Image: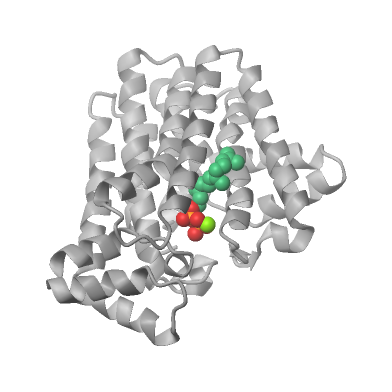
Amino acid sequence: MNNNLLDKLSPLIGEINRHLEETFKAQEGLLSEIGLYNYLGGGKRLRPLVFLLAAHSLKDTFPLPDFFFRSSIVFELIHMASLLHDDIVDHSEMRRGRKSAHLVFGITETVLSGDFILARASTLAMETGSMDFIGILTQLLEDLSIGELKQLKLRFNSAISLDDYYDIIKSKTAVLMSSAARAGALIAKGTNKELAALTQYGLDFGLGFQIKDDILDYKADPKTLGKPTFKDLAEGRITLPIILAAKNLSAKSAKELLRLAAKKQRDPEDFLAIASLIEEGQGIEEAQVIAEKHAENASLALGSLPDTVAKGLLIDLARYGAIREN
Ligand code: FPP
Ligand code: MG
């Protein structure tokens, strides 16, 4: 995140972190340890930020009530729990530059603490007293699980279509962003039209963000990224750069690219061959254009809202999601 944007967001991030830290410090034993390990691993706190900025874009009171901050962490807790579980599902060893929690605390312990974090998020949602808020949360949990299962089913499957890919990234990432934006609008007592605008914003922000994530898997510096590159390939995830490159390449090269992408036991040179075929098929460049288009659509979705500081920050955040380097 550039320093200018970070400076503007840091008061909100500070409050979000305070609530997260309090939540984990209040637990006992392993729940506190695993929670704090996860919390201290860092993260951009994008989901609660989207929640708070969505609320702020409709409610121009400074500062926002403490209750809004407390509710915002629902969306960071769900994100945290899903990543604890996801690293087990994916057998991933590294997250945010450190060992994944299951390698430090054990698989059973990490699954259960992820369950606890989900339960904690549900309690906070219940405290809002809003059935609509709870409805956003329950639908989100269904979508996340469905997305992860679909992704699992299509691992190492070269027949994955563009629609399959969009289904997966929508449920695993974009719905979390759109739920955060919608819930923020809800808590600020937005109209149905405002809720719809912010939901669409979150969806496009999330799609652009995940497409950029899939690009970074091929081209980021692993140190900045905090996880190894080519991880999607290693774990069998065939993502947009490959799908697009395969469409642009000659039939023979496309077949070779998809064969290598679906290969379970790869030699080191296979990774290089895949990278060079993606380059030849312009997979990264085309995916980047699409990511930026989603960021632009996210901004356009806010067109009917008044021009507030919060709206400007939502627009900056969506752009950042599509052009970031980590
Ligand atoms: C990361 O994708 C995975 C997700 C964002 C979704 C994980 C969802 C579940 C485990 C379903 C259960 C849901 C809950 C709420 C417990 P990735 O593996 O492509 O990203 P990565 O490279 O960062 O691991
Ligand atoms: Mg994973």
Q: Which of 260 and 220 is in front in this view?
A: 260
Identified at 48% across, 25% down, the residue is 183
Identified at 37% across, 50% down, the residue is 209
The quarter of the picture where residue 326 lies is bottom left
Judged from this view, the residue extending furthest toward the right is 29
Drawn side of residue 269 relative to residue 112, left or right: left
Drawn side of residue 120 relative to residue 255, left or right: right
Q: Nearer the viewer, residue 137 or 221?
A: 137
Identified at 39% across, 46% down, the residue is 168
Q: Is residue 297 above or below residue 182?
A: below
- Residue 82, image x and y in percent? 58, 45
Q: Which of 234 and 44 is in front in this view?
A: 234
Q: Nearer the viewer, residue 74 or 86?
A: 86
Q: Is residue 111 above or below residue 275?
A: above
Is residue 11 visible in this depiction of the protein?
no
Identified at 41% across, 60% down, the residue is 237
